[in-house]
Amino acid sequence: MADDPLRGHLVPGWNYEGRARFRPLCGVVLLVLFCCHGCVSARKRIEPEAPTSTADLPIDPVRVYTVACPDAVEIVWLDHPDSEWIGRIGADGCLNLPAIGSIRVEGLTTAEIARQIAARSAVFPERVQVRVAEFASRQVFLFGQVEGGPRAVDYRGPERIIDLLRRAGGLSPDAALNEIYVLRAQVGEGIPAEILTVDLPAILQRGDQSTNVRVQPLDEIYIGEKPRSRIRRALPTFLKPLYEGVVGFIPHPDWRTARRATHPVK
C-alpha cells in the first residue's frame, strides 16, 4: 500500500495499518446500538400516559356517603315491594332487620349495604334498594351572612361548597362574596386548622373550580359581611335612613359581581 503523507499525523503513535481490520466490526456495533436506541425510543412513544387524577372527576356525594349512627336508611326488596323498611342505625353501628337480624353497616355506602342484605336474603344485589332516609350523624357549620342565619346543616357526602350553600338557602344580600372561608380542623393534637379560601366570583363567572372545595364533616364555613352592612348595623336606628339615602348615590365597587354571583347560589 502506498504511503499516505497524512497517515501518522491524525493521531500520533496510532497503528492505522494494524487496526483497519476492526473497522467493519465497529460499523456492525454502531448499527446494533442505533437499532436498540430506535426500539427504546419507539417503546417510549407508545407507553400509555399516566392516568388522570381522580380528584376532580364528577362524583355523586350521596353514593359515596358512608352511614353512621344515628342515620336512618330505607330498604326496599323489589321482589316484595310491600316489604319496605325504614330503620335507624344504632349506637353499635348495626341495623336490626326483621327476619334477617342484626347487620353491621357503619362506615358502608348504600350500595355496600344492599350487597350485605342481598347476601343474607339470598337474592341478587340489584333486587335490593337502599337509600339514606335521614342524614343525622355528621354536620357542617355555617357562620355569617347565609340565608336562615348561622346554623348546623347535615353532611350529605363530599359535595362542593357551592352545592352546599345552595342547599342551605343561599347567601344573604349583605354577604361579601370575596370573604368566604372554610375552616377545617386537622386530626391530631397540636396540628393547626386548615383555612381554605373560596373565590365565589371566579367559580360562578369564570368557571374556575379550583376553590370550589368538597366539604368534609365538621367543616366550618364563614361568609363575611359587606363593609356597608357592618356600618349600617352599627348606626343608631334614627341615622340608618339617612345613611341608606347617602350610600345609594355611591357606586358600589362590586355591585356587578354581587348581582351576577349571588343569584346562582340561591
Image: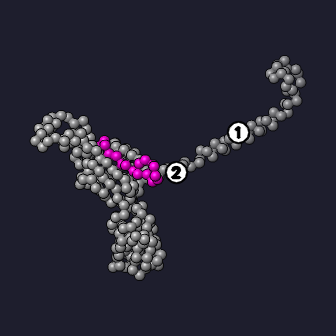
Residue 36, how many percent across, how many down?
70, 43
Is residue 205 in sight in this rendering? no
What segment is highlighted magenta in the picture? 177-193
Side of 163 relative to 30 (left or right): left
Residue 196, how many percent across, how many down?
38, 46
Question: What's the residue at 68%, 41% (across, down)?
Answer: 37
Write down the quadrant of residue 77 in the picture: bottom left
Residue placed most toward the observer, 165 or 219:
219
Q: Residues within 10 Å of mark 1 (few under 14, many from 20)?
A: few
**Along the polypeptide, which appears first: circle 1 or circle 2?**
1
At label 2, the amino acid type is Pro
Q: CA distance from mark 1 to mark 2?
A: 31 Å
Q: Which mark is residue 111?
A: none
Mark 1 residue element: helix
* In this view, the mark in front (1 or 2): 2
Question: What's the residue at 20%, 34% (across, down)?
Answer: 251
Mark 2 residue element: loop
In the rendered picture of this protein, how many numbered marks are placed on residues? 2
Task: Say if 225 sits above or below 158 in the image.
Answer: above
Residue 21, how many percent across, how many down?
85, 33
Residue placed most toward the observer, 6 or 147:
147
Q: Which residue is mark 2?
A: 51
Question: What's the residue at 43%, 47% (across, down)?
Answer: 192
Residue placed most toward the observer, 186 or 216:
186
Task: Tell me if label 1 and label 2 are in contact, CB under 8 Å.
Answer: no
Q: Which residue is mark 1?
A: 34
Residue placed most toward the observer, 230 or 249:
230
In the image, residue 182 lies in the stretch drawn in magenta: yes
